[in-house]
Amino acid sequence: MSNKIIDFLNNRSNVELKSEKIELGIIDDLKQYPSKVKNMMSELQGINKSAGDLKAKLRSVKTELNGFANQAANVSVQLKKDLEIFKKAASELGMNPSESKEYAEAVKSFTDFVNLEKAAQKIYADASEI
């Protein structure tokens, strides 16, 4: 009978030791979380900086696009005025303005400038959705 008691006590201490090992393992697991949080916070700060850099770049690009669209619009307005002046002058001289190569090219350029302005405005609108 005494062998059974000794066996029981021996087995019981093994169980307790295993329990202590499990507890120590959990403690080791818990110890990793503060450093993991610190690493992830650092990573998030890097992502946040990248996002800030992108926002700044996007603002800069939007400013450039707005300036480009305004420039194209201003050129379009001036070109339209010049086309009207030429058309009037050609009519006074009895000429058909469409027969002038320069006039025809300027009319095409006017359309191109209007399209440039629209394209810049569309890109600006797309960039604003980001």
Image (tube, rainbow, N blue to C red):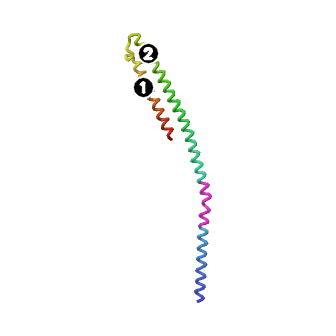
Identify the residue shown where x is 60% and y is 52%.
41
Q: Residue furthest bottom?
A: 1
Q: Position of residue 94 (x, y in %)?
A: 38, 10
Q: Which residues are magenta?
A: 26-39
Q: Cα distance, mark 2 to mark 1?
A: 17 Å
Question: What element does badge 1 sit on?
Answer: helix
Q: Residue furthest top?
A: 93
| 2 or 1: tag closer to the N-terminus | 2
Q: Magenta stretch: residue 49 in it?
A: no
Which amino acid, mark 1? Thr
**Residue 62: which disc?**
none
- In this rendering, position of residue 96 left or right of residue 34: left
Q: Quadrant of residue 109?
A: top left
Seen in the picture, residue 108 relative to 24 is either above or below; the reply is above
Residue, disc 2? 86
Which amino acid, mark 2? Phe
Question: Between 70 and 64, which is closer to the camera in this rendering?
Answer: 70
Q: Quadrant of residue 108?
A: top left
Question: Between 22 and 92, which is closer to the camera in this rendering?
Answer: 92
Question: What element does badge 2 sit on?
Answer: helix
Identify the residue shown where x is 61% and y is 72%.
20
Main SS, magenta region, reads helix
Q: Which quarter shows the N terminus?
A: bottom right
Neighbourhood count class around disc 1 (C-alpha, 10 Å): few under 14, some 14–19, many 20 upward: some
Identify the residue shown where x is 54% and y is 33%.
63
**Residue 111: which disc?**
1
Seen in the picture, residue 101 relative to 39 is either above or below; the reply is above
Q: Quadrant of residue 23?
A: bottom right
